[in-house]
Image (tube, grey):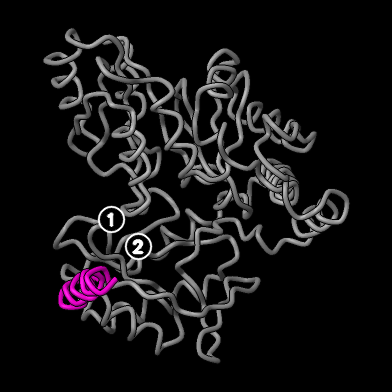
Amino acid sequence: MDSLDAFARDKLAALEAGALRRRLTATERGPEAAAERGGRRLVSFSCNDYLGLSHHPRVIAAGQAALAGFGAGSGGSRLVTGNHPILDALEARLARHKGAEAALVFGSGYLANLGITPALAGRGDLVLLDELSHACMWAGARLSGARVLAFRHNDAGHLAALLAEHRAAHRHAVLMTERVFSMDGDRAPMADILGVAAAYDAWTLVDDAHGLGIVEDGPRAPLEMGTLSKALGSYGGYLCASRALVDLLTSRARSFVYTTGLPPASAASALEALTILEAEPERCARPLTLARRFTARLGLPEAESAVVPVLVGEAEAALTLSAALEAAGFLVVAIRPPTVPAGTARLRVAFSAAHREDQVDALAEAVARLTGG
C-alpha cells in the first residue's frame, strides 16, 4: 500500500503543479439560479439546468409522488426486476418528441454512450468522431474494438476525406458528433454531416445533451441520444431510434443490460419536465436570448446555444478569474485540460431560463472589468 499511496501523491503533486487538480466544493443549489458556498449566496452560471426545471413545483411534485408510490430505487436491471410503467411512458414521450419510433432510457448519458457504440460496431468496423466529442463518446468508441479516427471539429469535408480513404476497408461505419458542443457551445453542421454519412453508408449518432429543449432545429440523425439531467432537470440518459435498433440495444448494450434501472422518481420528474418543455416555447427560447445578450455586451461571437466560452488560455489564469468572479457574487467554474485542449482553459458560462436580464448584465460587466474587455 505504501507504493500505491506514493503513486497517488506523485500524481496529485503533478496535477497541483499544473493547476489541474480538481476538488469537490460544498455547494447548495436553489431555485432561480441560486447557489450557496461558504455561507455566501451566489448567482450560478455553471449549471446545466437550462430551463430551470429542476426546481419547478410540478417537476418536484411528480418526483415526490413516484417516490412515495414506488420507492427510492428500481431494485435492479430492468430486464431482471421488470419494466416500470413510468419508464415505458417516458420512452414513448421521448420518441414522440424526437420523431423516432422508439426510445431506450439508460442510467445516465455517460452510460448511454458507453453502451450504444459497442453494441453497433466491433472489430472490422470504423468509428469516426468529431475531435471535440465528449469523453463518454470516446470511451464508447474505444470499448467497441473498432478502428477509431477523429475528424477536425465541425469539418464535414475532412470527414468525407477520411471516409473516402478508409470506408471501403471496413464492414460498417459509425459517425459521432454533438448537436451542441458542451464546452464551446457551437453547433454541428448536421445537414452536411448527414449528407456525408448517406454517401458512404455510415450510421450517425448525435449527442443532443446540450441541445434538447434549447436548439433542436435541423435534421434528425438515425441515432439521437441525450440526457435527462440538463434541460429536463432530472437524471438519466436516453437513445431515440428505430424500433429494431432499440430492441437490439435492449439485448446488447452492456451499460443497459447490466445496470440498475433508473429510479421511478427520476423518470417521473423527467416526464413532467418534458411536458412543460413542450408546452412553454417561450421558456425554451430564453436561454439562447440571454446568451446572445451576454455575447453582444462583451463583443464575443454571437452565441449559438445556452453555453458561451470565455477563453482565458492557461489553467492558472482561468482559476484566478473564476475566483475573482466568485468574490463578486457569481459562480462561473473554470474548465481546464484535459476537458478542453491545452492552452484553451476557459470559463464556461451556462445560461438558464431562471436567470434575469440584470444578472446577465452584471456578469458581463464583471467579466469586462476583470479581463480589461
Left or right: 74 as drawn, with respect to 348: right
Q: Position of residue 89 (x, y in %)?
A: 76, 33
Q: Position of residue 221 (x, y in %)?
A: 44, 23
Left or right: 294 as drawn, with respect to 93: left
Number of numbered discs on residues: 2
Q: Is residue 14 magenta?
A: yes
Magenta highlight range: 1-20
Which residue does the image show at 78% across and 62% down from the upper left? 57
Quarter of the figure with residue 164: top left
Which residue does the image show at 57% across and 38% down from the upper left? 106
Q: Residues within 10 Å of mark 1 (few under 14, many from 20)?
A: few
Please tell me whether residue 96 is drawn above or below residue 114 in the rendered image.
above
Mark 1 lies on residue: 301
Q: How far separated are the C-alphas under marks 2 and 1? A: 6 Å
Question: Which numbered disc, 2 or 1, marks the residue that appears first in the sequence?
Answer: 2
Numbered label attached to residue 295: 2
Q: Amino acid at mark 1?
A: Pro
Q: Main secondary structure of the magenta part?
A: helix
- Regarding residue 199, the answer to whether it shows in the image is no
Quarter of the figure with residue 160: top left
Q: Say which of 226 and 5 sits in front.
A: 5
Q: Is residue 25 magenta?
A: no
Q: Say which of 325 and 8 sits in front.
A: 8
Q: Position of residue 94 (x, y in %)?
A: 64, 33
Q: Position of residue 355 (x, y in %)?
A: 56, 68
Q: Are marks 2 and 1 in contact (CB under 8 Å)?
A: yes
Q: Say which of 208 and 111 sits in front.
A: 111
**Element under label 1?**
loop
